[in-house]
Amino acid sequence: MTIRPDRLRGWRSAFVTALFGSLILGCGQSGSGKPGSDQAGSGTPGSGAAPQTIDEIIRAKNLTPDEAAAALKTFVPPGKHDEFIMVTSGGQASNILLYGIPSMRLLKMIPVYGPDSWQGWGTGETESERMFKESSFGEKMPKLTWGDIHHPQISLTNGKYDGEWIAVSDKSAGRIAIISMRDMKTKQIYKTPNTVSDHHAVWSDDSEWLVQNTFFPAPYKEDKNFAPIEDYKTKYRGIASILKFDRKTGRIVPEESLQIELPPYFQDMSILGRGTSDGWMFINSIDTEMATGGTLEGKPALEVGASGREMDYLHVLNWKKAITLAKDEKKYTVVNGIKVISLQTVIDESMLYFIPESKSPHGVDLSPGGEYIIVSGKLDPHVSAYSVEKIKSAISDKNFEGKDDYGVPVLKYDACLEAHIPTGLGPLHSVFDEKGNGYTSHFLDSTVVKWTLGPPYHQADQAWKVVDKVAIHYNIGHLQTPASNTKKPLGKYLVALNKWSVDRYPSLGPLHPQNLQLIDISGPKMVVLSDTPTIGEPHNSQIIPVELVQAWSTYPETGWDAAHMRKSDVATEQGKEAIERKGDTVYVNGTVIRSHYTPDIVRVKQGDRVVFRWTNVESARDATHGFGLHGYNVNLSIDPGATETAEFVAEMPGVYPYYCTEFCSALHMEMTGWLLVEPK
């Protein structure tokens, strides 16, 4: 029987109405008037039978109506997909996590700066090993196998998410990694020259550029990159890197990139303008006191020294003018292979201005149309909104209150400020919805506060007002809404990325998970829907509609080189498998398919360099194979259609089995082989 769509909609509406009626009745009806009390009938609590009806389940779990409604709002039935994908930083765990919203199911982990044996990343696979080595600090320094990911960024086209690339910076080493959203794998790890750290990198509105700023200043121009800390003010500098990005290859192009020298403050979060603020970059800073610590040398700790002034500096930087300036050889020098515009040239060319901002700021965010810069100082109970038009007028009128120690003009605070919103203690970061509202996290109050933007989002009498507040658990850092940093925020949900979980989960040792809380913001009042534990500190995230994520299920060609996104030069076809010796190097050109390796016996001599090149000739979705080799610390994950390579020197003689580490078929246990290393 065919049901007409209009009748189907009516049936669904009636069902939902009845369901919520059942929720409310179920939470309110019991013999004692208390949810969870025993009642007669099959399946009721105390009857010995498992609860069956919605009413019985609600009472058995002792749910309130709000809790039951939250469960329904977040439930995604088996086989169904979420509305959104949240791309979340894994912090010092060195990875990216993908969560579905509203279910908050963990869907994928993307290894970036550290090894992950499940996905064969950094466990013998040649491309990841090369990336780790080449992005380290130098040949005499250890190979870096961890990073600190803070702020993943989804690429943009015309200021909106396009679902093509993810960029993630590494605070611990001044690196940027590029991830393709076609296969969710890392394609490049770029060590930014002249830097030892960064905190943030952001895309331009068409992702032609990635703009990254340092966190820790460094004496990058000094001999051997060293200067005594006593020379901090004169020899240490911060840097903003304007990195050219090739969207076709997914690579940063150093020869077309440039850097801008900044004073030795700790540059923190940053944002690129759009609309009326297009061409400008806004960067928070802390420690404008230029304190360096020295707790065992009779000096105050950095947290004390860096809190002496009442105001720090919001950097207002004309980054697009810098691109033009870098075409003039007289305006830059080349340092470690990249163009650098000196601080003095930046000042002489009127490219940099400062605005006083509340002490120890962290969040700097842009209203969707680019009209306002929203700044939160951790020690100020207000959120500050700066008008871009007022900033530009102050620059044009030279409305300065003075200069900093290096000669950078400081704009008058009152000339740039649009509004102060009294939101609470410890404001950090702000995000936006599609209705012209801002949402700010508060670390000390452990709250999210909702407030209204000014014109054109709200009329003057309704602008810059707090309209709602919700408590979270505990100590929130970042927060995120769908497409918040784009021209068209989508609203509906907000995720609080909380630093502490405390008692939200069973105690499983001293190290606790962090806590993600999903909040419904679709109505006038915010409602907390769920808790989700996450591993590694979740500094920030971005949320994209699931339909914009067009990832492959299998690679487009058999023998695919995932690192370079093309057909591999060393792919092997079925029937053409071979073992080739060239001098003391043995090349194993093989295939994998359910449920065997070809070849499954490899004979080499002690001291040989061995290169395994495995091509997965499967075309079926989810038919990934593994290659786990005993003794030599090698595990590959070979996705359908992929060619993966591992190489090592067979230094120890012996018999080393290899086997498929990804369950693939009924005869998975038989998918094995032998590496025979003959003694000299």
Image: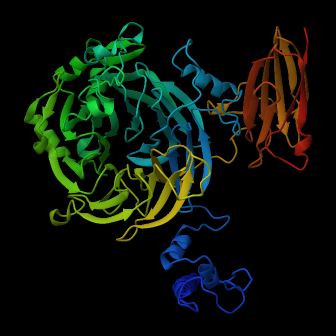
Rendered location of residue 491, percent (x, y): 40, 61
Instruction: Work out whether residue 184 can be spotted.
Output: no
Q: Quadrant of residue 438?
A: bottom left
**Quadrant in which the C terminus appears:** top right
Q: Nearer the viewer, residue 574 or 541?
A: 541
Q: Nearer the viewer, residue 171 or 155?
A: 171
Q: Is residue 419 left or right of residue 555?
A: left
Colour mapping used in the image: rainbow
**Quadrant in which the N terminus appears:** bottom right
Rendered location of residue 677, percent (x, y): 89, 18
The residue that appears at 20% across and 46% down in the rendered structure is 386
Whether 621 is drawn above or below 324: the answer is below
Rendered location of residue 13, percent (x, y): 53, 83
The residue that appears at 59% across and 21% down in the rendered structure is 143
Whether 422 is drawn above or below 379: the answer is below
Whether 523 is drawn above or below 43: the answer is above
Rendered location of residue 385, percent (x, y): 22, 50
Q: Nearer the viewer, residue 345 or 429?
A: 429
Q: Is residue 455 left or right of residue 576?
A: left
Q: Quadrant of residue 301?
A: top left
Q: Quadrant of residue 171?
A: top left
Instruction: Work out whether residue 451 can be spotted.
Output: yes
Number of numbered labels in the structure image = 0
